[in-house]
Each structure stands twice: as C-alpha cells, then as structure tokens.
Amino acid sequence: MEKKDIKSLTLEELKAEMAALGEKPFRAAQLYEWMHRKLSRGFGEMSNIPMAMKEKCGKNYSYTALRTVRVQESGLDGTRKYLFALADGNVVESVWMRYKHGNSVCISSQVGCRMGCRFCASTLDGLLRNLSPSEMLDQVYAITLETGERVSNVVVMGSGEPLDNYENLLRFIMLLTDENGLNISQRNVTVSTCGIVPNMRRLAEEKLQITLALSLHATTDEKRRELMPIANTYSMEELLSCCAYYFEQTGRRITFEYSLVRGVNDTREDAKMLADRLHGLNCHVNLIPVNPVKERSYVQSGKKAVEDFAALLTKRGVKATIRRELGRDIDGACGQLRRRFIEETTEGQ
Ligand code: SAH
C-alpha cells in the first residue's frame, strides 16, 4: 500500500491520524510544528518526538523533502533559480526574487504542462504528472531554509497549470496560509491560470483572498487561439465575464498577464482593443516582453513598443505596469532551466 503523504495533511487530519495510531493528540501539533514551522527535512530531526513514534511515522507515512539539484544566481539582480528533484526522480524549478516589499517565490504546480501555449517552454514535452500539495509547499520551505530569509509572497506561476491540479492547489494554499504553518497571508498569494473557466468559477466560490492572474496575451479569440490552445475551448467573452464574476465573488482585483510578442500582439491597435475589452473591469495589466525560448521563433517586442503599449492602456483608463524581467541571464522563463538540465543529463543516451 502506498504510504500517506504526511506533509500534505491538515492539522485536523493529522490529529485523526495520530488518534488512529494510538498517539496522544498533542503529538499531532508537535509533528505539524516540525514540518510546517521548523521546516524539518525528515522525522530524524524531531528531537521531542520519541524514537518509537518516529519509527512508526516512518513506516506509515512518506515525508516530502525536495533535494536541491542546482541553484543559479543572477549576476544582474540576485534572482535565484532552483532546480529540485522529487522522490521519483522528476525535477521541477522554482524562482526566488527579492523585491523592495519582500521576498517572492515562484513555484511550479505540475511536472511539465499539457496546455500547449506556443511561447512556453514548460509545455514542450507535455504533462508528466501533478505535484502534490507537499511538493508545492516544499519548494517554498527548501528555499526559505537555503536563503535563511522569510518568504512573504508566493506566486504559482512556474511550470504547470495550477487550475489543472485544482484539489492539490487548494490544499497547498490552505497549508501555506495556515496560522500554524508559515502563515503567509492569502493576499500575498497569486495563482496564474491560462483560463480554465469552470475551475476559475469554482475558485471564485471558495472566496479566498488570493490574487488571480489571468494569462491573456491577445485581444481577439482568433489571435489568442494562435498562441494558446485553451482559447479553442473558452472564448474571450466567457473568460472575461468569468473574471468579472471572480471579482464579484471575492472583491479581489484581477491581474492580466500580457506577454508582448513582436509583430503578433504588440501594435497600437492591440493596445486599443485590449483597453476596450477590459473597460469597466477592476483589473491591472502586467506587460512583459516575451522571453525568447530557443524551440520557438517568437521575438520580444522592442522597448519603445512596450512603453507605447503601456502608455496607451493608461491613457484609456486601464492600469498597466511593465514588469521588470528578473533573472534573464539564468533561464528565467518558465520551464527553461528544467529543460536545459534534462537535455544535459540525457545527452548522448
Ligand atoms: N499555466 C499558468 C501559470 C504558468 S505560466 C498560466 O498560464 O498562467 C506563468 C506566466 O508566464 C503565464 O502568464 C505564461 O503565459 C507566461 N509565459 C510562459 N512562457 C513565457 C515566455 N516565454 N515569455 C513570457 N511569458 C511567458
């Protein structure tokens, strides 16, 4: 029988587990504290837990502790990119960024991705598997330990489509924001989606205080379909009305991600159309010049085009920011580090 993943259990569930194993209720709180506060890497370090109980735990549960395979630090801005190995040998990547308002970690939610966005490196080999809640959490924990600094913001914007791994994502958010764990405020958690409408609705109804970021990248259905296959399933109209619903349910302003690709979605016409589309919606647009991926032919918009695009949106009443590109020199774009690592390690096989 497969062992239960102890770091994915809530405190309440852990209490029930301990009762079933004949342990005292306070043991659950101790274990939880070791895992989610002291960020322990295994049962071995839990000094106030009796040896017999540690052995029992080892027999009954698996303990997620990601192994750091590689760390790259940007010489430009101090951004750090981590490659972690999971227990089954798969690797995922995460990014640590330092901002004025605190440290931010960008985590992966799946190994690979099946959404097929044309400009994205994470999706090139499809989806291998979902990450468990503990595997998402431990990206944050391992980085906290490695940097020795508190993480204040978490963005689920690495490899994978979080709303394609809905149950695990939700449990991850609950554990991450739990007052008995790292206690990160829900307001400091952002989930980015390519736009799986039914799950966006479900998420709206959870009424969390997290930020939802929607990867839009185009202003018409036709253009969006060229860049993102998901646009064949949900129209822009459905998507935007779902965003309005999200705001209605949660009171949280939507962030739109818009990657600028030269000659594809970066004209003045596009900016005007985008402003029209978003008119009246409580939102914010993040503009980011597309990160060139070597397997794809997309080219970044020039600095002037990006600035003009932002200025046009602002003029038309849509709040827009040009996102700083952090970690450019270290394969900062989704999926690039993992890909390079796999290419290197399988070379000549
Ligand atoms: N699947 C989710 C989250 C992961 S991607 C989503 O689609 O939102 C995180 C963000 O990076 C998305 O906005 C995605 O469209 C964008 N992205 C992916 N590859 C990129 C690239 N090469 N250049 C710029 N942005 C990219």
Image: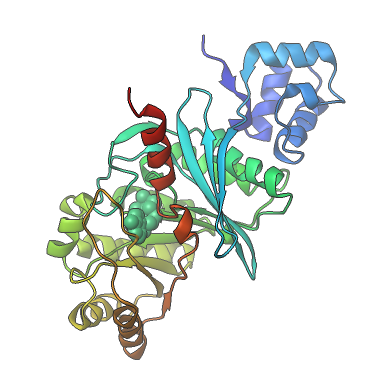
Name which residue lies at 45% across and 38% down. 167
Position above or below: 70 against 306: above
User: Please, which residue is most extreme toward the left here?
Assistant: 222
Give the tally of numbered discs: 0
Q: Examine the rendering and report whether any part of residue 21 can be seen.
A: no
Q: Position of residue 77 (x, y in %)?
A: 57, 64
Q: How is the image coloured?
A: rainbow
| Residue 78 on image: x %, y % | 60, 60
Q: Classify residue 66 as left or right of residue 246.
A: right
User: Ligand 1 shows up in which quadrant of the image?
Assistant: bottom left
Q: Residue at x 46, y 44 (%)?
A: 108
Residue 140, quarter of the rendered image: top right
The quarter of the displayed image where residue 304 is located: bottom left
As rendered, which of 235 and 16 lies closer to the eye? 235
**Quadrant of residue 101 within the rendered picture:** bottom right
Q: As rendered, which of 30 and 205 lies closer to the eye?
A: 30
In front of the other: 13 or 142: 142
Q: Nearer the viewer, residue 206 or 6?
A: 6
Q: Position of residue 117 (x, y in %)?
A: 26, 51
| Outermost bottom residue | 315
Q: Is residue 43 above or below residue 10?
A: above
Q: Residue at x 71, y 48 (%)?
A: 179
